[in-house]
Amino acid sequence: QQPVQSPQAVILREGEDAVINCSSSKALYSVHWYRQKHGEAPVFLMILLKGGEQKGHEKISASFNEKKQQSSLYLTASQLSYSGTYFCGTEGAGNNRKLIWGLGTSLAVNP
Amino acid sequence: DTGVSQDPRHKITKRGQNVTFRCDPISEHNRLYWYRQTLGQGPEFLTYFQNEAQLEKSRLLSDRFSAERPKGSFSTLEIQRTEQGDSAMYLCASSRDRVKPGELFFGEGSRLTVL
């Protein structure tokens, strides 16, 4: 089941904050967040595991509500370099390392 | 360069022809994934390997698609009798997973255009 991301698109001015959400209809073992710039490969941002463990960049924060099967990515004090499309990938409770990706959230940060 | 490399980066072919893509993962990465991505969409799972074993193949794929990872190193993705609907970016990613999932390292992708 493909996770649902919201919003579909966000436009920010430099320095503003944004939250991107990802929700699944199935129980999850992990949630992964990646950013992709136009014409480039997706780049790793964060992994959140069931049980609370996280792995990712210091400047990016995220949450994972296991009961609600939801994750949120928090982008604070946005910079121009944050622009791109953000994808969440979800791994089911079976812990099989197979990620199913959402449709993405397009983020544009303007000066 | 020790990243994931894919070849070719671009392929233009006529409908009905066969194409093969190659992916060289990061050394010692035991997991290798193939995804397909079209404009405005997220990566669509195709198949993945743990070492040389193909663990799963997407039900969305027809029998025209096949992937191999001999000796658990590089991998190839072959599409037989290509159709215009096969036009997309084919992404390869690798990871080093142990008890817990590791981050995926993506290659630059192989863009396929079927005329």
Image: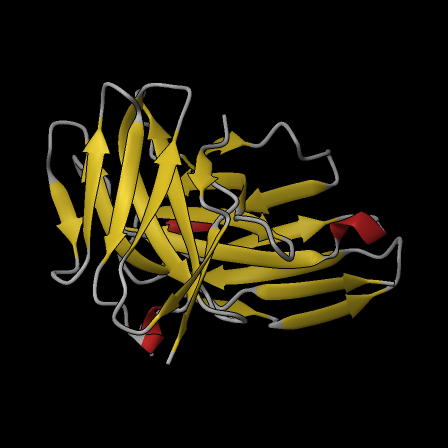
Total marks placed:
0
Which quadrant of the figure has residue A32?
top left
Residue A63, above or below A60:
above
Which quadrant of the figure has residue A21?
top left
Quadrant where the C terminus of chain A sits is bottom left
Nearest to the observer: residue A73 or residue B58: A73
Tell me what residue is drawn at x 73 percent, y 34 percent: B63
Tell me what residue is drawn at x 68 percent, y 42 percent: B65
The image position of residue B77, as x and y in percent, is: 60, 51
Q: How is the image coloured?
A: secondary structure
The image position of residue A18, as x and y in percent, is: 31, 55
The image position of residue A103, as x and y in percent, is: 52, 44
A33 relative position to A62: left or right: right
Nearest to the observer: residue A102 or residue A111: A111
The reply to whether residue A76 is in sight is: yes
Nearest to the observer: residue B8 or residue B87: B87
The reply to whether residue B69 is in sight is: no
Tell me what residue is drawn at x 59 percent, y 49 percent: B41
